[in-house]
Image: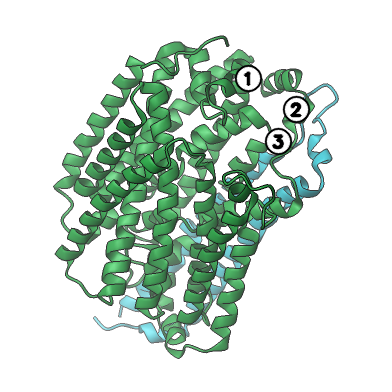
């Protein structure tokens, strides 16, 4: 079997380049969101403790800080889920197609 | 709660624990037949599925510091404990987005393989091997002392016997079963811990008619509004950001966690395992926070602190309050199993730093026959076990809580910057990597020594030379800056060429180990 596209050529292949740039865009965007999420939470602790100390409603003793902290954990898991879902479906399919083009004459 | 059985030998805890030990030794016996070469010893033959590895990763990560420590911190300090549960979780998505797949595609057995893949092997392996080993050792000390104290309280065994018992068991798992046995010990432990904590939380919430609001109302009534607001743990904004950096990026630089990526067959399974691990760990941290508030409201803060000043017995005491001696015994056995599993994971990782990175990578320039490498790895396991026992003796009765923090600071400063720059930045050079790792390691250790954590709290000096309690903001930032400046100062052609040549492997997994 002869390789249709060699390892050297694949680097210049348009589909492969598009795939890399798409993956990097998604990974970097999600990383920035994750950093904003966490350091936003830390900024509240560092600079605005009174806000975190407000209660969620006049009749409740639960402070806003508690759902916010749990929210940071849950949103982190969701962001991870978004990436995993995209990669498991879209990215893996594209990788498979490119590898097929490299291997099939 | 008026009294506790903690401190007297608990026959049920001992029975549960013996069942755990016997079944894990059974697994080790089964695994020992499979461990033939380096791929089995370091990477469980790359036969672990993403789901299994996700459980094993969370097993590696959910140490006694997070199970007993966070619950204890919440029970004694309230909201401040949440900072740790959030901080220890948020690094995982970053591992998923930036590290998991390239690490799996470019490395072989340790994260150092991926740092070194396009740089000069020997200098990188030497410095990274040492820094990896130092991270593991600090983590190990904290676990050993925790194990000794816990066993003393729960099983009524003397501290020294407990340390020796843990040391022997970890040697047995790793020496005979390698990563195969270690992985299954982690999976069982993760299942027990998640199950035990879930039951504990279910029973806690039952007391409040399944209303978190009612639990927080009781907490406010008992300890005031300030219990539910961030408080004294974080004194300055700079310290807050510094702690946050260490928690988030330390996670992404822990050698025993990064090593787990090589136990799965490919990058896809590596990615899945991080996602599952993030879910399990996030769920677990929400449970530990609930356990902490449950202990504060149901057991009472003064009771928790009378048994252990640091609050580490909050979880077991809550179990006793809710389910008597039986549940106390079960939770204590789970806590001990937790320590044992983490210690085994650390040992595989430390042994691989010695045999794969320092011996084969540095001393033999990457060339060694497999049989010899496995033999060195096993000798290293034995040596690490003995060192762990000796360190456990030396640090008896010491406050070692800062050592987990130190391990995270080193991981964030010495391991993480070099790894991420080598994976993502084309112009990174050997000199840059070495300079970055040395800067991060030395600064992290020296600054923590001079910080209030050791200089004042441990050594008893009146004021600290370095003002912050958390050092990562200086040590990690410096590691990045030094790595970038040194790399830009002198170009390394070869490293850049390999970076380009390896692009198909990095994204498509072609030719990955």
Q: The disc numbered 1 marks a residue on which chain?
A: B
Toward the viewer: B30 or B345?
Answer: B345
Q: Secondary structure at mark 3?
A: helix
Which x, y percent locates residue B280? 48, 40
Q: Are marks 1 and 2 on the same chain?
A: no
Q: Nearer the viewer, mark 1 or mark 3?
A: 1
Residue B4: x and y in percent read 49, 13
- Which residue lies under the disc numbered 2? A62
Q: Chain of mark 2?
A: A
Can the viewer see residue A62? yes
| Identity of the residue drawn at 50% across and 22% down | B200
Between the C-alphas of marks 3 and 2, the distance is 9 Å
Q: Is residue B149 above or below residue B448?
A: above
The residue wearing badge 1 is B302
The quarter of the picture where residue B443 lies is bottom right
Q: Secondary structure at mark 1?
A: helix
Q: Residue at x 56, y 26 (%)?
A: B291
| Colour treatment of the image | by chain
Q: Residue furthest top?
A: B2
Taking B265 as reference, is B94 left or right?
A: right
- Crowding around mark 1 (Cα neighbors within 10 Å: few <14, some 14 to 19, many 20+) is some
Q: Circle 3 sits on which residue?
A: A67
Identify the hue of chain B: green
Q: Earlier in the sequence, mark 3 or mark 2?
A: 2
Q: Quadrant of the N terminus of chain B?
A: top right
On the image, which quarter does residue B52 sit in?
top left
Q: Are marks 3 and 2 in contact (CB under 8 Å)?
A: yes
Q: Nearer the viewer, mark 1 or mark 2?
A: 1
Question: From the viewer's perspective, is residue B56 above or below residue B131?
Answer: above
Query: Do callouts 1 and 3 mark residues in contact (Cβ within 8 Å)?
Result: no
């Amino acid at each position: 079997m002869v390789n249709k596209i060699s390892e050297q050529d694949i680097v210049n292949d348009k589909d492969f380049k598009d795939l890399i740039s798409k993956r990097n865009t998604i990974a970097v965007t999600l990383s920035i969101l994750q950093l904003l999420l966490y350091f936003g939470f830390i900024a509240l602790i560092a600079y605005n403790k009174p806000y975190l100390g407000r209660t969620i409603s006049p009749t409740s003793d639960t402070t806003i800080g508690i759902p916010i902290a749990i929210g940071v954990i849950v949103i982190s898991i969701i962001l991870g889920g978004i990436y995993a879902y995209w990669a498991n479906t879209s990215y893996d399919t594209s990788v498979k197609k490119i590898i097929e083009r490299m291997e099939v004459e | 709660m008026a009294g506790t059985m903690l401190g007297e030998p608990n026959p049920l805890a001992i029975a549960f624990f013996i069942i755990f030990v016997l079944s894990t030794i059974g697994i080790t016996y089964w695994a020992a037949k499979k461990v033939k070469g380096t791929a089995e010893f370091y990477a469980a033959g790359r036969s672990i599925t993403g789901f299994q590895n996700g459980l094993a990763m969370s097993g590696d990560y959910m140490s006694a510091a997070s199970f007993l420590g966070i619950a204890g911190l919440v029970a004694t300090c309230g909201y401040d404990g949440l900072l740790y549960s959030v901080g220890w979780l948020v690094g995982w998505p970053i591992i998923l987005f930036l590290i998991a797949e390239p690490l799996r595609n470019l490395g072989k057995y340790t994260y150092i393989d991926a740092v070194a893949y396009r740089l000069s092997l020997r200098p990188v392996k030497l410095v990274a091997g040492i820094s990896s080993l130092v991270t593991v050792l600090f983590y190990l000390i904290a676990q050993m002392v925790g194990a000794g104290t816990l066993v003393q309280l729960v099983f009524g065994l003397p501290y020294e016997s407990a340390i020796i018992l843990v040391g022997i068991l970890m040697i047995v798992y790793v020496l005979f079963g390698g990563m195969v046995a270690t992985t299954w010990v982690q999976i069982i432990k993760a299942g027990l811990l998640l199950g035990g904590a879930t039951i504990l939380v279910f029973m806690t919430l039952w007391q409040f008619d399944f209303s978190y609001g009612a639990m927080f109302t009781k907490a406010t009534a008992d300890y005031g509004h300030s219990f539910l607001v961030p408080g004294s743990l974080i004194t300055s904004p700079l310290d807050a950001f510094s702690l946050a950096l260490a928690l988030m990026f330390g996670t992404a630089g822990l050698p025993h966690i990064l090593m787990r990526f090589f136990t799965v067959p490919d990058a896809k399974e590596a990615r899945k395992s991080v996602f599952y691990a993030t879910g399990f760990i996030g769920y677990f941290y929400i449970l530990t926070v609930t356990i902490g508030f449950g202990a504060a409201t149901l057991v009472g803060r003064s009771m928790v602190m009378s048994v252990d000043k640091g609050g580490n017995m909050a979880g077991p005491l809550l179990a006793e309050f809710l389910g008597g001696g039986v549940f106390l015994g079960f939770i204590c056995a789970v806590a001990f199993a937790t320590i044992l599993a983490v210690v085994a994971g650390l040992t595989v990782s430390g042994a691989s730093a010695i045999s794969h990175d320092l011996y084969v990578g540095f001393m033999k320039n990457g060339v060694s026959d497999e049989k010899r490498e496995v033999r060195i790895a096993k000798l290293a396991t034995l040596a690490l076990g003995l060192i762990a026992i000796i360190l456990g003796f030396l640090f008896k009765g010491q406050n070692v809580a800062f050592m987990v923090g130190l391990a995270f600071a080193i991981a964030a400063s010495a391991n993480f910057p070099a790894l991420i720059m080598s994976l993502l930045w084309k112009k990174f050079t050997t000199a840059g990597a070495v300079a970055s790792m040395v800067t991060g390691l030395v600064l992290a250790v020296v600054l923590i020594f001079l910080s209030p954590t050791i200089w004042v709290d441990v050594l008893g000096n009146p004021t600290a030379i370095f003002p912050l309690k958390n050092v990562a903001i200086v040590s990690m930032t410096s590691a990045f800056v030094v790595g970038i400046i040194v790399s830009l100062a002198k170009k390394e052609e070869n490293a850049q060429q390999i970076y380009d040549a390896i692009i198909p492997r990095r994204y498509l997994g072609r030719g990955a180990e």
